[in-house]
Image (cartoon, helix red, strand yellow):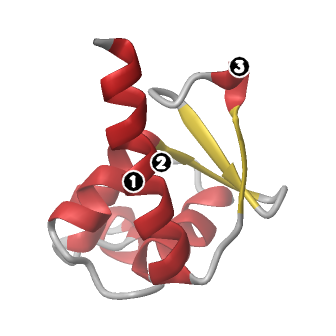
Amino acid sequence: MRNKLDKVLGKYIKKFEKKHGLRFEFAVSDDLMGVICFGDVLFFDINNIVYDIDTKQPKGLIIDWLYDTMHQDKYINFESYSMGLRYEQKQNR
């Protein structure tokens, strides 16, 4: 079953690569169910990749989220970010 799962995840990764103009480098610990690296600098959890593809998020939104998240004390998950929550809003709470 794991081989079938890896094939499906590989298809998600290829679609994500094409959508965002990225190049797959490796899966951390060679596990496609974990963290995936693109271009040696961008790391995404497979759950966020699947969410991005399945919900047809705008091109580049996940990259904006990643950069917005890097230097924050608090964390907004990608799903909430895709629905419009931003760090500026969270600071006021």
Q: CA distance from mark 1 to mark 2?
A: 32 Å
Are circles 1 and 3 on residues that touch, CB within 8 Å? no
Please identify the quarter of the rendering in which residue 72 is found.
bottom right
Label 2: state its secondary structure: loop
Give the tally of numbered discs: 3
Q: Residue at x 41, y 68 (%)?
A: 15
Mark closer to the chain start, 3 or 2: 3
User: Which residue is disc 2 drawn over?
Assistant: 74
Mark closer to the chain start, 1 or 2: 1
Residue 23 at x, y percent in the picture: 70, 67
User: Which residue is disc 3 drawn over?
Assistant: 29
Q: Hey, what amino acid is under mark 3?
A: Ser
Front-most of residues 80 and 33:
33
Label 1: state its secondary structure: helix
User: Which residue is disc 1 drawn over?
Assistant: 11
Q: Residue at x 68, y 23 (%)?
A: 30
Which is in the foreground here, disc 1 or disc 2?
1
- Above or below residue 47? Residue 77 is below
Q: Hey, what amino acid is under mark 2?
A: Lys
For label 2, the crowd category at 10 Å Cα-Cα, with few meaning under 14, some 14 to 19 and many 20 or more, is few
Please identify the quarter of the rendering in which residue 38 is found.
bottom right
Label 3: state its secondary structure: helix
**Drawn side of residue 33 relative to residue 53, left or right:** right
User: Quadrant of the image for the C terminus?
Assistant: bottom left
| Residue most extreme to the right | 40
Q: CA distance from mark 3 to mark 2?
A: 27 Å
Question: Visible in this render: residue 77?
Answer: no
